[in-house]
Image (tube, rainbow, N blue to C red):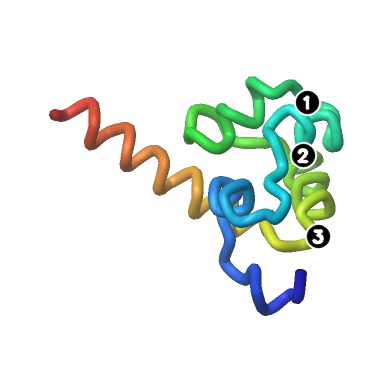
Amino acid sequence: MPFWYCLGMTLDEYFKTQDPKVSHADFAKRIGVTQAAISRYVNGERFPSPELIRKIHEATAECVTANDLVKGFEEAQQKRAKEAAE
């Protein structure tokens, strides 16, 4: 994937746009965590450690950066807060 194609891509967007789509389970194995951990990162329930941020960056061919992970985490947190308020 060309670098310009994936600028500003959250982890959630990465999973939605891959062709062929990468499963959470396969990605988790690639970076050495559980599928549940990946789901928590995507859903804003947990934020990865600095070491896992590096592994995610490498495993996504540099498509998902630390800044992108922060953005995705904040968006997921806002979505969860909005749903809880309703």
Horizontal and vertical percent position of residue 33: 78, 26
Residue beneath the point at 69% across and 23% down: 35
Marks 2 and 1: in contact by CB < 8 Å?
Answer: yes
Q: Residues within 10 Å of mark 3 (few under 14, many from 20)?
A: some
Disc 1 to disc 2, how far (Cα)? 9 Å
Q: Quadrant of residue 3?
A: bottom right
Q: Helix, strand or loop at disc 3? A: loop
**Residue 81 left/right relative to 19:** left
Question: On screen, 81 above or below 20?
Answer: above
Return the disc, 2 or 3, that comes first in the chain's sequence. 2
Horizontal and vertical percent position of residue 6: 64, 68
Return the disc, 1 or 2, that comes first in the chain's sequence. 1
**Of residues 72 and 21, the one drawn nearer to the viewer in this rendering:** 21
Marks 3 and 1: in contact by CB < 8 Å?
Answer: no
Residue 52 is tagged as: 2
Residue beneath the point at 82% across and 49% down: 59
Residue 33 is tagged as: 1
Three-letter code for the amino acid on which mark 1 is drawn: Val
Question: On screen, 30 above or below 35?
Answer: below
Disc 2 to disc 3, how far (Cα)? 14 Å
Residue beneath the point at 27% across and 33% down: 81
Three-letter code for the amino acid on which mark 2 is drawn: Leu
Disc 1 to disc 3, how far (Cα)? 18 Å
Residue placed under numbered mark 3 in the picture: 61
**Residue 29 left/right relative to 17:** right
